[in-house]
């Protein structure tokens, strides 16, 4: 390996898990630059450790995984967040993704799946599970319902919907590329776009909320 | 306050009625002072003691009885007039309809007793006083009962939310350990691998249960089934269920039929393609509910379905189609070497 190893930080309140993940990552040649057992440690250690990838458990002592995701990405937008969750709390997972996380795995994933996910997230890819794809699809469907209709709401193109649906049905990017006669890269881009639009929309919503609440004055 | 202003005003207006104006002035001053005191005393529940309430009624009574002394025997209106209502209301609110009745009777009887001749108006006023006391007491009682019921409901809701939070915390810990055992077990091999496999099965079952439980609060809608929660229960090793993360309600019978159809699809995979993995995707698209069940098995051999039909056997696929058709929906089957997929679409009623 001529490339420098990928810098990773592991955040998990469960010591057994934290150690296991750290060991696996180190054994596979990753550089574990930091660990944290809760949200405040994670946020405090992140700037000095400067990881490329944050492997983050959602259920940690406050601030929770969603807030940590938003906070570290505000500090370093080039960092990537991979959510590793035991229970897959659906609402939390969706919020974390909206806050900017680009990968999601359940803890029952094998070691190889985890290592592969860290590599892909570090490279800028998004790591979806069928479950996450289902949640994202559901979120777009809700945003497009007449009751919630707002011209500012993000919409998926037909192709993006098609691809996301296939991910939710458990097809791999390779299988999707074959079925739709697209390149692997194009499929990857479509999937990425679905997340990017949601994240952008989330930022706009937060800003709008802040302005409505008059919180923007504090920053000005 | 309004009552005291009214009484003071009336007394000033009728000042010439007083035989002893100074004594009358003293009585009015007492009235104002006592009103100020009661406003302060009743503001805090801790100060609403029997003594204060008793005194309140006693002062009202004393003012009432003093009327003939300062105004002369042939007076038409008592010094406090309607002001006595203050004490009456306090009794009614505090001791419910019984308190209201007692206070009203005491006041009414003394009011009538001090008059030389009882006119119809006097009697009417006294009568209203008694009725009013009882009615307000009754109202106070039912108000309090409602407040108690509301408090109970709020306490129950808070307890349920706390239970759910605790359950999540406990489950999360259990899931962590199960996932870890599964992971390490499969790496160690041998007996440990078997333990790991068992842990993995339990982990999947528990996760499915939690997802189903998360959706429980929406269960309140009468007679509907949350298809999202029911399908989440079908998750097991080799079966992944994806949904929108919010409840998807369908009328009871239709909901149960849809879930049964999906279960039949999954059972079919297990029977004909053992070891194959399945994915279930639930979507609510406008006024329709769409469910896809896909597996990565070898697919159904060509001619197999029509062969079954020719032999007069109603295959599983026909029973699935029939079920969905009964719901006014459609079920389409695609199969190939890459696996088999059922796409079920049913209308969402009442929307």
Image (spheres, coloured by chain):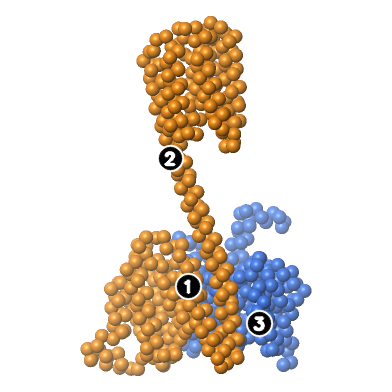
Q: Could you tell me which secondary element the residue under label 3 belongs to?
A: helix
- The residue located at (38%, 70%) in the rendering is B288
Q: Do labels 1 and 2 share a chain?
A: yes
As drawn, the chain in orange is B
In the figure, B91 relative to B279: above or below?
Answer: above
Is there any visible trace of residue A122 in the rendered image?
no
As drawn, the chain in blue is A
| Quadrant in which the N terminus of chain B is drawn | top right
Q: Where does label 3 land, which residue?
A: A21
Rate crowding at label 3 as few (under 14), some (14 to 19) or many (20 or more) other CA atoms within 10 Å. many
Chain letter for mark 1 = B
- The residue located at (57%, 24%) in the rendering is B35
Q: Where does label 1 land, which residue?
A: B209
Q: Could you tell me which secondary element the residue under label 1 belongs to?
A: helix
Q: Where does label 2 land, which residue?
A: B142
Q: Could you tell me which secondary element the residue under label 2 belongs to?
A: helix
């Amino acid at each position: 390996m001529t490339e420098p190893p990928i810098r990773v930080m592991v955040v998990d309140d469960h010591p057994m898990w934290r150690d296991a993940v750290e060991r696996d990552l180190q054994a596979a040649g990753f550089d574990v630059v930091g660990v944290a057992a809760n949200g405040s440690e994670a946020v405090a250690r992140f700037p000095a450790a400067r990881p490329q990838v944050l492997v983050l458990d959602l259920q940690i002592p406050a601030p929770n995984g969603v807030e940590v995701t938003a906070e570290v990405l505000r500090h370093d937008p080039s960092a990537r967040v991979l959510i590793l969750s035991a229970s897959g709390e659906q609402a939390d997972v969706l919020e974390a993704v909206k806050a900017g996380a680009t990968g999601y795995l359940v803890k029952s994933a094998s070691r190889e799946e985890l290592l592969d996910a860290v590599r892909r997230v570090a490279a800028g890819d998004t790591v979806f599970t069928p479950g996450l794809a289902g949640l994202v699809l559901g979120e777009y469907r809700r945003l497009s319902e007449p009751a919630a209709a707002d011209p500012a709401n993000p919409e998926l193109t037909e192709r993006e919907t098609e691809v996301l649906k296939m991910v939710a049905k458990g097809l791999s990017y390779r299988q999707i590329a074959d079925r739709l006669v697209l390149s692997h890269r194009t499929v990857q881009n479509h999937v990425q776009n679905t997340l990017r639009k949601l994240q952008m929309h989330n930022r706009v919503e937060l800003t709008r909320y802040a302005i409505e609440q008059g919180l923007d004055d504090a920053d000005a | 306050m309004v009552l005291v202003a009214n009484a003071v005003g009336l007394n000033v207006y009728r000042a010439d009625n007083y035989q002893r104006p100074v004594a009358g002035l003293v009585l009015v001053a007492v009235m104002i002072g006592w009103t100020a005191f009661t406003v302060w005393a009743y503001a805090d529940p801790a100060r609403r003691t029997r003594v204060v309430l008793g005194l309140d009624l006693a002062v009202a009574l004393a003012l009432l009885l003093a009327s003939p002394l300062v105004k002369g025997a042939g007076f038409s209106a008592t010094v406090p007039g309607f002001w006595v209502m203050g004490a009456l209301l306090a009794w009614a609110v505090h001791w419910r309809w019984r308190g209201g009745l007692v206070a009203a009777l005491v006041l009414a009887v003394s009011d009538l007793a001090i008059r030389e001749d009882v006119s119809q108006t006097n009697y009417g006023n006294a009568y209203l006083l008694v009725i009013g006391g009882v009615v307000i007491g009754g109202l106070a009682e039912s108000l309090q009962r409602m407040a108690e019921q509301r408090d109970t409901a709020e306490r129950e809701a808070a307890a349920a939310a706390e239970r759910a939070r605790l359950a999540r915390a406990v489950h999360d810990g259990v899931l962590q350990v199960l996932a870890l055992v599964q992971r390490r077990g499969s790496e160690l091999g041998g007996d440990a691998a078997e333990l790991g496999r068992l842990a993995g099965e339990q982990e999947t079952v528990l996760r499915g249960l939690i997802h189903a439980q998360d959706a429980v609060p929406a269960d309140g809608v009468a007679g509907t089934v949350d298809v999202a929660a029911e399908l989440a229960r079908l998750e097991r090793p080799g079966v992944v269920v994806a949904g929108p993360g919010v409840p998807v309600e369908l009328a009871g019978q239709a909901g149960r039929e849809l879930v049964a159809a999906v279960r039949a699809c999954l059972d079919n995979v297990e029977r004909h393609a053992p070891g194959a993995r399945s994915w279930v995707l639930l979507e609510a698209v406008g006024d329709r509910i769409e469910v896809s069940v896909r597996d990565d098995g070898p697919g159904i051999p060509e001619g197999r379905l029509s062969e079954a039909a020719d032999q007069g056997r109603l295959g599983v696929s026909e029973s699935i189609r029939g079920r969905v058709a009964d719901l006014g929906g459609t079920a389409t089957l695609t199969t190939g070497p890459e696996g088999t997929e059922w796409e079920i679409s049913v209308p969402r009623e009442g929307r």
